Amino acid sequence: MIMKEAVLQTLRQGDCISGETLAKVLGISRTAIWKCIRSLQREGYQIESFHGKGYRLIGRPDLLLPKEIKAGLRTNLLGQQIAYHQEVSSTQDAAKSLAAQGANEGTIVIAETQTAGRGRIGRDWASPPGGIYLSIILRPAINPSEAIRFPIIAGVAAAQAIEQLTELKPELKWPNDILIRGLKVGGILIDMSAETDRINYIIIGIGINVNTESLPHEIKGIVTSLKTECGKEVSRVQLAQDILVQLESLYQIFEVSGFETIRKRWKALSNTIGAWVSVRGERERLDGRAMDIDVDGALIVQKADGTLERVISGDILGVTGQ
Amino acid sequence: MELDDLKKVIRLLRDTDITELQIEKEGIKIKIRRDKFFSAASGPQQPVLVEKKGVKVEEAEEGLLTVASPVIGTFYRSSSPDVEAFVDVGTEVKKGDTLCVIEAMKLMNTIESEIDGVIIKIFLENGHPVEYGEPIFLVRPK
């Protein structure tokens, strides 16, 4: 098993390398090398073999395999431990149970599909193949009441990652829906377990429609995928890596210098500020102009009578007239 | 402090000349005031002011524990509108059992019981906003 990873590692360098050299470098027999190659090919790695010359890696499987995500991952904390699932009920629930069992900060759960992906209270998150379903365990040493800023932090991280990789212009709808041309391409849900004055863990769940083809009919016209918007496939491994890098960087900024820089970035990415919005809460509806987000990330809405309202919960239904 | 205790205190004051009384216990402040020109029996009663503050209120004489919200948000009694509530009045809970979820900006804060006990009271209705430090449950420890 470890030998197979070593073979892959060597092939990643890009050159054609002979079985004999591989065997010598890794200190195993050529037959063992051949077995490793066969096993990698079965996983979806495309490895050419030239008689007399050796092997060359020409294609990787389009899967979010831990070894793919870890290869070249430029983080110190996030994604150092990865739990990978072909299919899982929910990466959030899987991450919750890992966190409850004491998983290290930065551990991630990632899946190709989810059978019971979750949105906000009582809502599903459609999770067909081709998307990224990622949950990240954090254990910030802050008071639980300060955790309210993580939805904003995570939204900025995901939008920046998409912007960097695709040259698309993602926008954030308060608090953290990720939109492209007004269509939803990603969403974020955060679970927290806390005691009165300390956080046990926070789990940031990010779902992105990357190369997703088969989104449910009832959300067509509301959602899109990066592939649709770019007109070509987008590397899911690369995007997952970029999200981890961005989130780690913002997490450090938050810990070291506070929320203000991130709040400004959110505002620059937002389609909400300055717009007329209709916010549907659990019990009431509020119409007005979105003025700002405050030091917690709460939305400040000015009603028609000029009074200001601070919104911390609810869905923004319409965003019109910048 | 339960309503019955409050009534007892008010009854005690009735036969005295005391017009103002303030009781403060860990996190709960109760102020009772009456106009000295009215006797309790004949005149209109002054409102009883109950102020609350603090995060966790231990009520020693009753031995009840108030679970207060560590965050602001919207209070949810179940994980979804079409499933049963995590707990009801009378539900026996173990340490670590989920009592409710408080949501703010799609951050779902699961509130777990810190003790074994029985739910005596639920202060809020499903879907209501909750403030930092606001009481949500009263639990009788086992």
Image (cartoon, coloured by chain):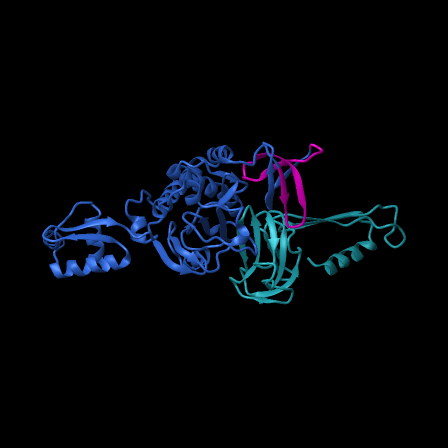
Chain colours: A blue, B cyan
Split into 4 quadrants, where in the image is the N terminus of chain A?
A: bottom left
Can residue A295 be found in the magenta stretch?
Answer: yes
Magenta stretch: give its range: A277-306
Res B91 → quadrant? bottom right
B117 shown above or below B46: below
Q: Identify the residue at image location x=66%, y=42%.
A: A286
Query: Which of A96 and A241 lies nearest the eye of the viewer?
Result: A241
Left or right: residue A121 versus residue A306 is left
Is residue B70 shown to the viewer in this render? no
User: x and y percent of residue A322 in the render?
Assistant: 58, 31
| Residue A272 belongs to magenta span | no
Left or right: A44, with B43 as reference point: left
- Closest to the observer: A304 or A152? A304
Taking depth in this image into account, of A289 and A130 the one nearest to the observer is A130
- Residue B28 image point, x, y percent: 66, 50
The answer to whether residue B139 is seen in the rendering is: yes
Residue at the spot 55% in from the left edge and 41% down from the top edge: A174
Q: Is residue A65 left or right of residue B105?
A: left
Q: Quadrant of residue A97?
A: bottom left
On screen, residue B41 above or below A230: below
Residue at the right extreme of this rendering: B42
Q: How many marks?
A: 0
Measured from the top left, where is residue A197 in percent x and y?
Answer: 51, 49
Q: Residue at x 50, y 41 (%)?
A: A179
Q: Position of residue B14 (x, y in %)?
A: 82, 54
